[in-house]
Amino acid sequence: MAMMAGASFASAAEIRVLNWQGYGTDEAFAVEAFEKKTGTTVVHDYFTSEQEMLTKLRTNPGAYDVVLVNSAFTGQAKAEGLITKIDTSDISNFADLAPNLGQNADLVPGGDVYGVAWTWGVTSLTVNKDVVKPAPTSLNVLWDPQYAGKVSIRDDGVEAVQFAALATGQGINDIKDLDAVKAKLKALMPQIKTFWSSENDWNQFFSAGDFVVSTFWSGGAGRSASKGLPVEFIVPEEGAIGWLDSLAIPTASTHQAEARAFINWMIDPEFYVKWAANGAPSSASNKANAALPDTDFNKVTLGDPAVVARVQFMAPLSDDTRKAYLELWQDVKTAQ
């Protein structure tokens, strides 16, 4: 894979994909298979936050043909004219998407597809199963005094507020009592050994024994478990934070047919089953999930409808709400 050099535009036989690094679209086997089948070269550029993704689309019109957009940001990208309506008539695998994901209201506003549901996952509890026994069923384990100094959460204000909302009996998309959230987070601070910000961070800290209870992504937990780490992923009784990622086409793309072909390959069971062996998140495709072995991490941890029912999927946040959450989080951290 080659990183983009500047904002040079794609040639006729080249599409440029904007995504998180190491997130499926740049799997070597997947790119090689697509290039061999279509003759279209795939080049990647990467972002490290959704805000950076939006900035790259704004400042480099025409530079990208496929972009990874979380459903919570689809509305904003659409409103700014950064992504275009997708004709799914030649995306044959679209019909195999789970209806609640493929027709997600944020991705398909008014029946028009602006994002093809690709992967979904959960940010929830993860414990070192060699240390934390029996497996907890409640988020309150984060506040359990016996794990003081052995807890970690991601240094993300929105996520921190949402977990505290769950712990105080509130929905992540309908937080009415921010005072209770702030008090809960203040009570969590003495428990924290360290914050993590990336999957690499998490694995290093976990392997070193810095924490035994944390929040983490389901896909990351699956990859860590596949490497032999004693990871147990839990969706507690209070619920967990769900996310849905889609593949979209920038409005200024001049290679939309090639982009649709690439998106179709990304939701193909043949691609997904191979990726799943490397610790992929859950697929939005029912057909792809059905092709997985029964021992697959996502099938085991998220295959129970009762578990999935506890997941609350993130809705878009207004700028004011996001700012309020980030300021609250900063206040909590600086008070320590």
Image (tube, helix red, strand yellow):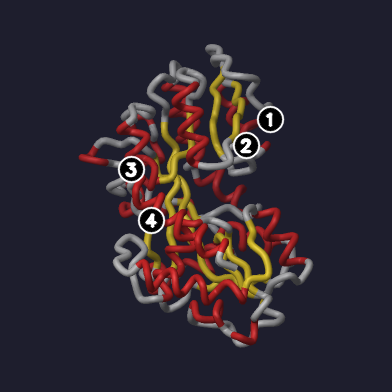
Q: Spatial distance from mark 4 to mark 1, Cα to Cα?
A: 31 Å
Look at label 3 and name its amino acid: Leu
SS for dot 1: loop
Please provide percent x and percent y for residue 30.
61, 37
Residue 240 drawn at (x, y percent): 44, 67
Q: Badge 3: few (under 14), some or many (20 or more) residues near its Cα, within 10 Å? A: many
Residue at the image position 31 percent from the left and 45 percent from the top: 106
The structure residue drawn at horizontal position 20% and vertical position 40%, both measured from the top left corner, is 110
- Indicate which disc, 4 or 1, sits on the residue closer to the N terminus: 1
Amino acid at dot 2 = Asp
> For numbered disc 3, what is the local secondary structure?
loop
How would you rate the neighbour count of disc 1 (Cα within 10 Å): few for under 14, some for 14-19, many for 20 or more?
few
Residue under pointer 3 = 107
Q: Depth check: 67 or 72 in front?
A: 72
Alpha carbon separation for disc pair 4 and 2:
26 Å
Dot 1 corresponds to which residue? 1
**10 Å neighbourhood of mark 2: few (<14), some, or many (≥20)?**
many
The tag earlier along the polypeptide, 2 or 3, is 2
- Asked if the residues shown at circle 1 and circle 2 are in contact, with their CB atoms under 8 angstroms apart, the answer is yes
User: In the image, which is nearer the foreground, mark 2 or mark 3?
Assistant: 3
CB under 8 Å between callouts 2 and 3? no
For disc 2, the marked residue is: 26
The N terminus sits in image quarter: top right
Camera-nearest residue between 203 and 160: 160
Mark 4 residue type: Met
